[in-house]
Image (tube, rainbow, N blue to C red):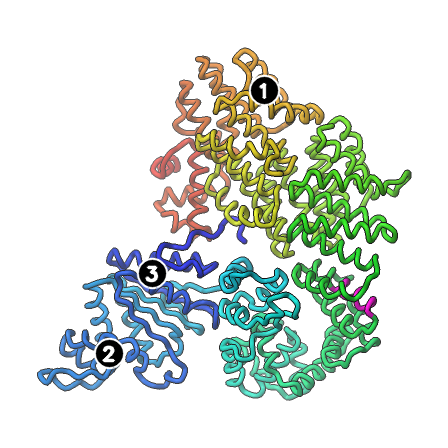
C-alpha cells in the first residue's frame, strides 16, 4: 500500500486477474495504442521465474484486437539449435515469405522449411545480416496491413542467431506500427525501456488467492500462503491447487513448501543441479540458515574446503543473493523449496556443520537453532537453553530471533503448560516483529495445551490486540473481554488494559452500547486508592462514557485527571489514552504534546508495535490545530510503520486521515487516490471510524464541486449515528454538514445538529471550537444576526491561532457581505483568506477566494512576487517549466511522478494567481 498512489483501473481489453500489475498493463496498453496510431516500440520485461511475465504477454495478446500477433518462446533444450527460435516465429507466416523480395524470401524460406517456386533462384548462403534484414522487411510488410505485436517469452533461452535477428528488427522498427514485448529472466544490458515485474504485494496476492479459491480460505491459511509464496503468482496458484481437505478446513497444518511435483519447484531444483558441487554446498548451507555472514562463509570454507569462488556461481544462478556482507536466499519461497528437496542425511550433515561453525558467544542462538533442528524430542535441557537465549535476543530487540528460539523451545518441551507459555512468548515476539499471522498461528497452537485461566487470558489479550489492529474489532472486543475475565484475579492491571482495548474496539466498530457495557465492567473493578495507572484507566472510562452520553460537563474532571496522571506514567499507552482525553475536552495543544510523547515512548522503549496507533492521535491533534503538513507527515510515518508491523486497520486509519486532509484542502485527485485502497477494506473489516472519515472526506469533495445535496446525503447518517459511525467523527464533521444543509436550504436539519456541536464546544471552553460554533450559527442565521456571529467567530479564531479555519470563516463572511452588496467590506476578508489559502497550498480554496475577490471588484490577476513564497521544490519546478520542460521531463529530472508534478503546478498557479504555463513562464522571465 502506497501513500501517494493507489491501484488504477486495469486498462480496457486486459483481464482483471493480473492483480497488482496496473503500471505494467498501462505501459503495454500505451504501446498498443501507439501502434494503432502508426508508431511502434519495444519494451523489455524482466522478472524471476513465475512472477508473471508469460501472463503479461498473454494479456497483451488478448488485448491486441486487430493486430497480427506473433509469438516466440525460448526453450532451454533448443538454445543450441541455430535458428530454432525464428523457425517457431515464422512458421505461421510461411505463405507470406514468398511475397517478399527475391533476396529476402530466399533468406527466410529455409528457416521455415518452405519451398520457393521453380522460378525463384536458389537460396543464397545464409549470412546473419541478410537474415536480420529479411526479418525486418517481413515485419515492415505486415505492419502496412495491420499493427503487429511480436511477443518473445524467455528471450534469454533463444538461440543466438534468432535473438540477434529479433533485436535487430526491434531497433529499427520504431517508426512502424510494430510492438515488441521481450520477456526474460536473465536480461543483459538494457537496450529498450525495461519493465521489471516485482513480486506481488500482499494485497494483490490475497486477491489472486480469492480468484483461485472462490469459496474462500481460513484467514491464517491465506496469510501463510501469501508469506510462503513471497509474491510469486505461479507459486500461489500451485499452492492453492495442492491444498488438502484438512488444510482447506483449517484443521491441518499449512504447507511449508511447494508441492513435490510443482513445476516451479522443479525449476529451482534444475538450477540447483546445474551448479558445481561447491556452489551446491553453499546454497544448501544458506537455505538451512536463511543467511550467512562473510565470516561464517570463510569459516565454512576452511572447514569443508568450499571454494569461495562458488559464491559468484551461486548468485549468478539466482538461488543466492550476495548482499555485500551477507549471502542469503532470495525469498522464503526459494529457501523452502531447496530445503524441502534436501535429503535427510544432507540436512543432518548441514545442521551439524552449522551448529559447530556458529558455536561462538555472538552466534550462540543460531548454533542452538541448528542443534534443535536435528534434536530428538523432548529435550528439556536444550529447550531451557533456547529460552534463555531468546530472552537475551529480546533484550536487544531482535524479536525475530527470540520468536524462533521460543518456538523451538516449545517444540522440545514435554510439559503442556510450559509449552503453552513458550508458544505465548513466541507469539508475542512475532507480534512485536510485525509477523501478525505467524503470531495468530502460534496462539492457535497453544489453546488446546492448557486450561489455566491466566495463560488463556494472556493469549486472549494478545489475540484481541491483534484483532483490534489487524482484524475485526468486534471479534477483538470479545477476546479482550474474555481476557479481562481470565486476568482479573491474577493480573488486575492487565485485565484493565484488556478492557481499555475492548472499549477502543467498540469505538472503532461504532458500537457505543458496547462501549457503555465495557465501561460498566471497568467501573465494577474500581477500588479506592488505586495505583496511578489503574486510576487513569478508570477515569478514562468515566470521562468517555459521560461524553458519549452527552454529559460534557460531567466528563471534564475525570478526563483532566487522565491528562495529568499521564505526565507521571511511562510508556506509550497511558500517554495515548491521555491524548484522546485531551482531544475530547478540547485541549488540542496538550493533546499534541501527549501524542508526541506517546510516539517517542513507543519508538524509544522497543515496543514500536504501538507507534502506528500513537501516530494516529498525533495526526488528529495536528489536524485540530490546522497543522495540515504535520498531520500528513504523522500519517505518512504511521502508514509506513503500520505496513511494516502488519497492522492493516491502523494503515486504513492513516490512509483515511491522509485522504481527509487532502479533501479539506480541496485536492480531489489526491483524496480519492488515498481512499481507493482504504474504503473497501474498512467496510469489509467493520471499521466504522474510517468508514465515517471516508464519508466526511467525500462530502468535503462534494462541497468543493458544488454538490451540497450529495454532501448532505453522505453526512446525514454520520451525524445522526444511523450508520453506527464513530461519535467523535460526528462532532468534527458538523461544520461541513452545516454548510451543506444551508446550501440545500435545510435550516431545520442544520439547527438540530448544531445543538450537539454547540453543547460540546461550550463544554471545551476552547476558542477554536467556539469559533467554529459561531461560524455555523452565522451560516444558519439571518443577515443581522449573522454579521454579529461572524465577527465573534473571527475574534475567537484569532485568539486560538487556527489560520486555516480563520481563512474559511473570512471567506464565508466575505461571500455573505458581497451578496449583501457590501463589496468594500467583503474585500478585506476575502483578500486575507486568499493569502492564507495560498500559504497552505489549498488550490481549490485559493481559487474560490480569488473568484470572490474579483467579483467584489478587486483585480487579482497575479500575486505580487514579494508576497509569495514558493517552496524550494515548487521554485525548481517553476523554473523548469519556464525553460520549456514538459511534466514528464520534469518528473524524470526530479525523480517524481508526472501526477505529482501536476499537483505541484496547481498549487503554484494558485499561489501566484495565474492560470497557465505561459503565464508562469512570463512570471519567471
Q: Residues within 10 Å of mark 3 (few under 14, many from 20)?
A: some
Q: Nearer the viewer, residue 428 or 241?
A: 241
Q: Tell me if 99 is positioned left or right of 797 in this view.
A: left
Asked if the residues shown at circle 1 and circle 3 are in contact, with their CB atoms under 8 angstroms apart, the answer is no
Q: Nearer the viewer, residue 761 or 542?
A: 542
Q: Is residue 304 above or below residue 136?
A: below
State the SS at label 2. Answer: helix
> Nearer the N terminus, badge 1 or badge 3?
3
Q: Nearer the viewer, residue 6 or 821?
A: 6
Residue 216, x across and y down, in percent: 56, 61
Instruction: For marks 2 and 3, give the one nearer the viewer.
Output: 3
Q: Is residue 696 above or below residue 155?
A: above
In the picture of the structure, the residue carrying the numbered disc 3 is 63
State the SS at label 3. Answer: helix
What range is drawn magenta here? 416-426
State the SS at label 1. Answer: helix
Residue at image point 79% right, 58% down: 456
In the picture of the structure, the residue carrying the numbered disc 1 is 777
Residue 285, x across and y down, in percent: 64, 80
For residue 131, the mark is 2
Q: Is residue 666 above or below residue 355?
A: above
Amino acid at each position: 500500500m502506497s501513500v501517494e498512489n493507489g491501484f488504477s483501473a486495469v486498462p480496457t481489453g486486459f483481464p482483471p486477474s493480473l492483480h497488482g500489475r496496473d503500471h505494467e498493463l498501462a505501459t503495454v496498453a500505451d504501446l498498443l495504442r501507439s501502434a494503432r496510431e502508426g508508431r511502434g516500440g519495444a519494451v523489455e520485461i524482466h522478472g524471476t521465474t513465475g512472477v508473471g511475465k508469460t501472463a503479461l504477454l498473454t494479456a497483451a495478446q488478448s488485448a491486441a484486437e486487430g493486430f497480427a500477433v506473433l509469438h516466440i518462446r525460448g526453450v532451454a533444450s533448443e538454445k543450441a539449435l541455430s535458428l530454432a527460435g525464428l523457425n517457431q516465429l515464422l512458421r505461421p507466416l510461411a505463405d507470406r515469405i514468398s511475397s517478399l523480395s527475391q533476396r529476402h524470401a530466399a533468406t527466410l524460406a529455409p528457416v521455415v522449411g518452405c519451398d520457393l517456386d521453380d522460378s525463384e533462384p536458389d537460396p543464397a548462403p545464409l549470412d546473419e545480416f541478410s537474415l536480420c534484414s529479411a526479418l525486418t522487411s517481413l515485419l515492415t510488410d505486415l505492419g502496412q496491413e495491420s499493427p503487429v505485436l511480436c511477443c518473445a517469452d524467455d528471450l534469454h533461452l533463444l538461440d543466438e542467431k534468432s535473438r540477434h535477428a529479433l533485436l535487430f528488427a526491434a531497433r529499427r522498427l520504431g517508426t512502424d506500427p510494430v510492438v515488441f514485448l521481450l520477456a526474460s529472466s536473465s536480461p543483459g544490458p538494457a537496450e529498450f525501456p525495461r519493465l521489471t515485474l516485482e513480486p506481488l504485494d500482499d494485497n494483490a496476492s490475497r486477491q489472486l488467492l480469492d480468484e483461485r479459491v472462490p469459496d474462500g480460505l481460513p484467514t491464517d491459511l491465506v496469510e501463510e500462503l501469501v508469506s510462503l509464496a513471497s509474491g510469486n503468482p505461479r507459486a500461489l496458484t500451485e499452492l492453492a491447487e495442492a491444498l488438502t481437505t484438512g488444510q482447506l478446513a483449517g484443521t491441518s497444518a499449512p504447507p511449508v513448501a511447494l508441492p513435490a511435483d510443482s513445476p516451479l519447484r522443479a525449476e529451482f531444483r534444475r538450477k540447483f543441479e546445474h551448479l558445481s558441487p561447491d556452489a551446491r554446498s553453499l546454497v544448501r548451507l544458506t537455505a538451512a540458515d536463511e543467511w550467512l555472514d562473510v565470516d561464517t562463509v570463510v569459516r565454512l570454507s576452511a572447514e569443508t574446503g568450499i571454494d569461495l569462488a562458488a559464491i559468484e556461481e551461486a548468485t549468478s544462478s539466482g538461488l543466492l543473493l550476495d548482499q555485500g556482507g551477507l549471502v542469503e536466499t532470495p525469498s522464503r519461497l526459494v529457501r523452502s523449496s531447496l530445503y524441502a528437496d534436501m535429503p535427510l542425511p544432507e540436512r543432518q550433515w548441514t545442521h551439524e556443520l552449522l551448529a559447530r561453525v556458529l558455536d561462538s558467544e555472538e552466534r550462540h542462538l543460531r548454533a542452538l537453532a541448528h542443534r534443535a533442528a536435528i534434536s530428538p524430542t523432548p529435550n528439556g535441557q536444550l529447550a531451557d537453553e533456547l529460552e534463555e537465549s531468546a530472552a537475551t535476543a529480546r533484550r536487544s530487540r531482535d524479536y525475530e530471533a527470540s520468536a524462533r528460539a521460543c518456538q523451538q523451545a516449545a517444540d522440545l518441551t514435554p510439559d503442556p503448560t510450559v509449552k503453552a507459555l513458550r508458544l505465548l512468548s513466541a507469539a508475542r515476539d512475532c507480534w512485536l516483529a510485525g509477523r501478525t499471522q505467524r503470531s495468530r498461528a502460534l496462539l492457535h497452537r497453544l489453546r488446546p495445551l492448557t486450561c489455566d485461566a491466566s495463560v488463556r487470558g494472556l493469549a486472549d489479550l494478545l489475540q484481541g490486540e491483534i484483532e483490534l489492529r489487524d482484524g475485526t474489532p468486534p471479534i477483538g472486543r470479545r477476546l479482550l473481554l474474555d481476557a479481562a475475565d481470565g486476568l482479573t484475579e491474577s493480573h488486575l492491571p492487565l485485565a484493565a488494559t484488556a478492557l481499555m482495548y475492548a472499549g477502543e474496539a467498540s469505538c472503532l466498530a461504532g458500537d457505543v452500547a458496547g462501549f457503555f457495557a465495557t465501561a460498566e465492567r471497568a467501573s465494577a473493578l474500581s477500588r479506592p486508592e488505586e495505583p496511578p495507572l489503574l486510576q487513569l484507566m478508570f477515569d478514562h472510562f468515566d470521562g468517555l462514557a459521560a461524553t458519549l452520553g452527552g454529559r460534557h460537563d460531567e466528563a471534564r474532571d475525570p478526563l483532566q485527571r487522565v491528562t495529568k496522571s499521564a505526565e507521571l506514567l511511562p510508556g506509550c499507552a497511558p500517554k495515548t489514552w491521555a491524548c484522546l482525553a485531551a482531544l475530547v475536552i478540547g485541549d488540542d495543544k496538550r493533546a499534541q504534546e501527549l501524542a508526541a510523547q506517546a510516539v517517542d515512548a513507543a519508538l524509544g522503549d522497543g515496543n514500536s508495535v504501538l507507534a502506528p496507533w500513537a501516530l494516529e492521535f498525533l495526526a488528529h491533534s495536528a489536524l485540530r490545530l490546522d497543522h495540515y503538513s504535520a498531520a500528513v507527515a504523522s500519517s505518512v510515518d504511521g502508514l509506513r510503520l503500520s505496513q511494516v508491523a502488519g497492522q492493516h486497520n491502523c494503515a486504513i486509519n492513516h490512509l483515511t486521515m491522509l485522504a481527509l486532509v487532502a479533501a479539506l484542502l480541496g485536492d480531489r485527485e489526491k483524496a480519492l487516490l488515498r481512499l481507493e485502497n482504504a474504503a473497501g477494506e474498512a467496510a469489509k473489516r467493520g471499521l466504522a471510524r474510517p468508514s465515517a472519515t471516508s464519508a466526511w472526506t467525500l462530502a468535503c469533495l462534494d462541497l468543493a464541486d458544488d454538490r451540497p445535496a450529495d454532501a448532505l446525503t453522505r453526512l446525514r447518517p454520520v451525524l445522526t449515528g444511523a450508520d453506527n459511525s464513530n461519535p467523535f467523527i460526528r462532532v468534527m464533521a458538523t461544520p461541513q454538514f452545516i454548510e451543506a444543509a444551508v446550501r440545500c436550504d435545510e435550516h431545520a436539519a442544520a439547527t438540530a445538529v448544531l445543538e450537539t456541536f454547540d453543547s460540546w464546544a461550550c463544554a471545551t471552553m476552547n476558542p477554536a471550537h467556539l469559533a467554529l460554533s459561531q461560524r455555523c450559527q452565522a451560516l444558519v442565521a439571518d443577515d443581522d444576526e449573522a454579521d454579529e456571529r461572524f465577527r465573534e467567530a473571527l475574534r475567537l479564531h484569532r485568539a486560538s491561532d487556527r489560520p486555516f479555519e480563520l481563512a474559511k470563516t473570512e471567506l464565508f463572511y466575505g461571500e455573505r457581505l458581497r451578496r449583501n452588496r457590501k463589496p468594500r467590506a467583503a474585500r478585506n476578508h476575502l483578500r486575507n483568506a486568499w493569502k492564507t489559502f495560498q500559504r497552505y497550498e489549498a488550490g481549490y480554496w485559493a481559487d474560490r477566494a480569488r473568484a470572490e475577490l474579483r467579483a467584489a471588484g478587486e483585480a487579482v490577476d497575479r500575486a505580487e512576487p514579494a508576497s509569495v513564497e514558493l517552496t524550494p521544490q515548487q521554485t525548481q519546478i517553476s523554473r523548469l517549466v519556464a525553460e520549456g520542460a514538459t511534466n514528464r521531463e520534469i518528473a524524470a529530472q526530479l525523480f517524481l511522478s508526472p501526477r505529482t508534478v501536476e499537483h505541484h503546478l496547481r498549487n503554484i498557479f494558485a499561489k501566484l494567481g495565474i492560470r497557465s504555463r505561459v503565464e508562469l513562464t512570463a512570471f519567471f522571465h
